[in-house]
Image (cartoon, rainbow, N blue to C red):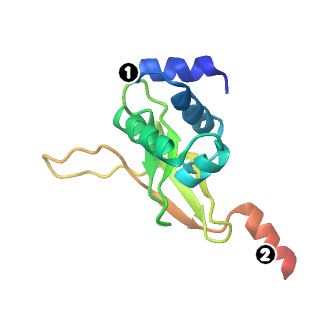
Amino acid sequence: MENRKCIDRLEQKGVRVTSIRILVLGALMESSRPMSLADLEKELETVDKSSIFRTLGIFEKHHVVHSIDDGTGSIKYEACEGKDNCTIADMHTHFYCEICHRTFCLKDITAPLVNLPDGFQVHSINYIVKGVCPACRRTVAGRS
């Protein structure tokens, strides 16, 4: 990931730029799927877990990333697209494969909007579909 893109995104969101924040955001922006704290720790071997955790907290507070609870007990994170806050595009559907335990972004499938009663305000939508991904389906079909 080009550092300039990360620096620009952090500055745009009002987050002080540090080398760790550039590394964490770069990993999230390069990833084709949401990443957990453990995924980031594995990807960024030189960065300790507590630094990554603190960085993710700052990123969430400033809408640099949003979190996804896919029901596995391990929160996943992905970079927000919006300039100021997460956008409707960030509230897309996610797919959790029950075989390989990976979570995929289905950006072309927006999460359904819910008409809430007066006084309620939506900040995020967490829409998870669970099943078997194409790669695991091929593997399972090949064993039959």
For disc 2, the marked residue is: 140
Residue type, mark 2 in image: Val
Q: Among all residues in the image, which is located at the extreme left?
A: 119
Dot 2 crowding, Cα within 10 Å, few <14, some 14–19, many 20+: few
The residue mark sitting in front, 1 or 2, is 1
Identify the image quadrant of the C terminus: bottom right
> Quarter of the image holding residue 48?
top right
Secondary structure beneath dot 2 equals helix
Disc 1 and disc 2 in contact, CB within 8 angstroms? no
Q: Along the polypeptide, which appears first: circle 1 or circle 2?
A: 1
Residue 93 shown left or right of residue 62 in the figure: right
Residue at (35% x, 46% y) in the render: 124
For disc 1, the marked residue is: 14
Residue at (67% x, 27% y) in the render: 1
What x and y, as percent, mark residue 23? 59, 32
Secondary structure beneath dot 1 equals loop
Residue at (45% x, 37% y) in the render: 55
Q: CA distance from mark 1 to mark 2?
A: 47 Å
Residue 126 shown left or right of residue 139 in the figure: left
Residue type, mark 1 in image: Gly
What x and y, as percent, mark residue 57? 39, 41
Which of the labelled discs sits on residue 37, or is there none?
none
Residue at (57% x, 54% y) in the render: 38
> Quarter of the image holding residue 29?
top right
